[in-house]
């Protein structure tokens, strides 16, 4: 769950191309740092007691190095990959206009000039 929220927030804050009026300009990401900080704080408060606050598989892998059991390390890696893939799919479905614009631009570049 944490990996999904983190990846989904990052995709929307950093790569969104359309504004609310439907324009084609890049929205900019001046609020990206604030969005990440707020999302991380919310996730630590809400999910931290369950997962130990390890939203990155590399952090979850540190347990065995600190003398803890290595039996649950796989869950951090599987959950991170599944959460990231699900966030990417949701982003693609909800922001399909951005991808249509990109495909149009690529087809215009590839079309021979008359």
Image: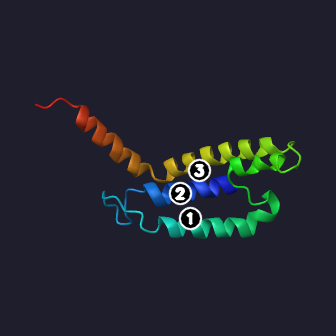
Q: Secondary structure at mark 3?
A: helix
Frontmost of labels 2 and 3 is 2
Cα distance in 3D space between marks 1 and 2: 7 Å
Asked whether the beta carbons under mark 1 and mark 2 sit within 8 Å of each other, the answer is: yes
Residue 99 tag number: none
Discs 3/1, front: 1
Q: Quadrant of residue 16?
A: bottom left
Q: Is residue 102 above or below residue 12?
A: above
Q: Is residue 94 left or right of residue 55?
A: left
Decide which of 60, 88 is in the foreground and name it.
60
Locate residue 75, reporting x and y percent: 78, 44
| Residue at horizontal 44 percent and vertical 54 percent from the top | 15
Residue 43 position, x and y percent, is 69, 65
Label 3, on which residue?
87
- Residue 36's mark? 1
Tell me how the rendering is colored: rainbow
Left or right? Give the position of 76 relative to 24: right
Quadrant that contains the N terminus = bottom right
Q: Secondary structure at mark 1?
A: helix
Q: Residue furthest left?
A: 114
The residues tagged by marks 3 and 1 sit, at their Cα atoms, a distance apart of 15 Å
Q: Residue at x 79, y 59 (%)?
A: 52
Earlier residue among tags 2 and 3: 2
- Dot 1 or dot 2, earlier in sequence: 2
- Read off the residue under disc 2: 10
Q: Are marks 2 and 3 in contact (CB under 8 Å)?
A: no
Q: Secondary structure at mark 2?
A: helix
Residue 71: % across, % down = 87, 42
User: What separation in Å lies between label 2 and label 3 (alpha carbons)?
Assistant: 10 Å
């Amino acid at each position: 769950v944490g990996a999904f929220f983190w990846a989904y927030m990052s995709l929307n804050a950093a790569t969104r191309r359309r504004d609310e009026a439907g324009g084609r300009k890049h929205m900019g990401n001046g609020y990206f740092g604030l969005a990440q900080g707020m999302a991380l704080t919310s996730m630590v408060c809400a999910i931290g007691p369950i997962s130990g606050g390890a939203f990155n598989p590399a952090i979850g892998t540190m347990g065995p190095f600190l003398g803890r059991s290595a039996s649950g390390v796989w869950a951090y890696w599987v959950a991170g990959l599944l959460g990231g893939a699900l966030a990417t799919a949701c982003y693609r479905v909800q922001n399909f206009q951005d991808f249509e614009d990109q495909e149009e631009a690529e087809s215009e570049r590839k079309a021979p000039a008359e």
